[in-house]
Amino acid sequence: MRRCLLLGILWVCCAAAVRGDASGATASTAPADSAQTSTPAPADAPTPAVADTARLRPDPAWAWWRWPPVHAAIAIAPLDGPQDILAKEEILADRIDALVIEAARLDTLAAAWQARSVAMTAQLEVLEDLADVQLGGDLEFQQRTGSVREEVVQAAEQITTFAATRTALAEELIRLRSLSETYRQQAAQLREEEESSR
Amino acid sequence: MTRILRLLSAVAVVGISVVTTADAADDPTALSVGGALEGSARYNSNLTLLSADGPVQPKSAFLTELNGRLSASRTLGAWRFDAQFNGLANLHTSYTDRDWFFHRGRVGLRRSAAGGTVELVNETRYYTVPDRNTFDFLRNVALLSWRRKLNDRWRLHSGYEGIITRYPQSPFFDYTVHGLLAELRTRWSLGLTTYYLVDLQRYAGEAQPQDAEAEASPQDGNRVLAQVGFDWLFAGRHSLSGTYSIQQDEADLGVQQIGDIEGPDGSQDNEAEFDLDKQKATLLYAVPLSTRVLLSTYAEWIHKDFDDEERLRQRLPRRTDTLLLTSTHLRIRLNSDLSLKLRYLYRGNRSSVDLLEYGNHIASVGVEFRPR
């Protein structure tokens, strides 16, 4: 019995050692991949609070927040004229468009996860009913129920992540649209000043 | 009178589970407690009971079943704790006055570790037929496992399992199992997952040499199981799951099977079987027809080929069983707390041993109270 217990512990330890830090690698590469495949449009710098959230949650759902920051590219210099400001506003508009596309993609994924959550919850309910009539079922059945239970938890976590990223993205869109509007007004104001000075 | 007392105690247990029901709000660290109470009436067209001399002539029977469930879960720091308790009373209202009771308790503890999730699950089952204790049993399963996401598609689940089965009135049936399992899960898309499981077990019977005269569980044996399966969510809310498994069991001479031939209602599989080759296929389909109605159907096919050295020596037919079970279940939510449950189940066995053949239709109607 002791030998079997030892074998069991060894099995778990070996399995742990085989893959090293695979999940960590996945977590760190996922955003990079997303950044490469996503439109590398310039944008304003993220607010510190959301940037921290993104760092804490290396989920692909937060990929948009790790797009290359382009705040330097849209920073208004003292000698910028209306055309320069409008050119920077164009950059902002591109980022807004990219974020709108990302928001739509996230909405589609969130809806798919929502449907998955409903179906998995129903499946878990059915399995628990079945467990009652099977007096618990065999070990494989218990494994299966355990896996579905974990899938339900995972789906709930994923839906929460999507809700959080979607809220942050909506706030970011409001901020960028406001900034874009400010740039347009500033460019118009400068143009008026230039025309009046002539 | 004794029967009434037992019934009242069963109701009390499930009653407590419902009274203690509470719901955790959105706070995931809060203690979440839930409970359910179910009462159902059941008709079995062909109930077979075991007596000391073997199975008695099957008859149709009506039964009342009470089922209580209590569950709790909580996150404490990095640990996730969850527990379930299930108490079942099966009360016969005709044919026999022998009721049976079943209790199942499960405790799970898990946390993130070694780049994955480590989980310790312990489940204890106790089955008893008061006044007739031959096949009362206590079964404890402990599973220490580790799940890890290898990449976006593959997941590994491996672990150690320890199963202790005790028959308080028949200790020569006692046996203990140690095993290792490894499962790979592949997620092909958000809706389709396949998995591949290998389970290696070694078991040892606790029978003493003086029990040799009696039929006892095998003193030594091993079991290999390979299983493939899938979970498919399609067309939005339909789910279909299937498994196919092959099991090979090699054991010393001993009993081939412990307990009721037919096993529990919902499955004809029996883990207390030895020295056989077994194939099993299952299909489970579930669909919420509306927000109130959930339909599910389950089918199970099992083929068992026992290694009957004794039988062959006595020129008796080799024991081969082919079992089929199909079940359709409809759950209708009457309101947020109350559900109506309808189930029809067919189960049968075609065996090379005439005595072991059966076929029953089981229909049940139940009401479940689950405060939400």
Image (cartoon, coloured by chain):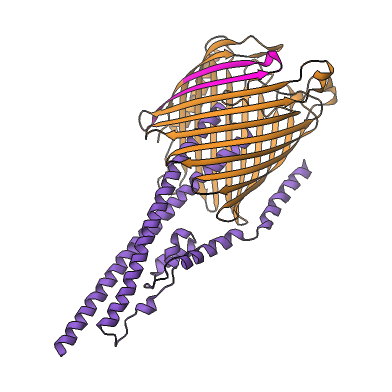
Q: Quadrant of residue B89?
A: top right
Please name the residue shown 62% across and 22% down the image: B128
The part of the chain drawn in magenta is B336-364
Please indicate whether residue B212 sits to the left or right of residue A60 in the image: right
| Chain A palette colour | purple
The image shows residue B48, relative to residue A123, as above or below, that is: above
Looking at this rendering, what residue extends furthest in the bottom direction? A198
The answer to whether B90 appears left or right of B263 in the picture is: left
- Residue B162: x and y in percent read 70, 39
Image: B118 above or below B280: below
Identified at 29% across, 85% down, the residue is: A80
Q: How many marks?
A: 0
Q: Nearer the viewer, residue A32 or A78?
A: A32
Q: Does the image show residue B194?
A: yes
Horizontal and vertical percent position of residue A123: 49, 37
Does the stretch in magenta take in B363? yes
The chain in orange: B
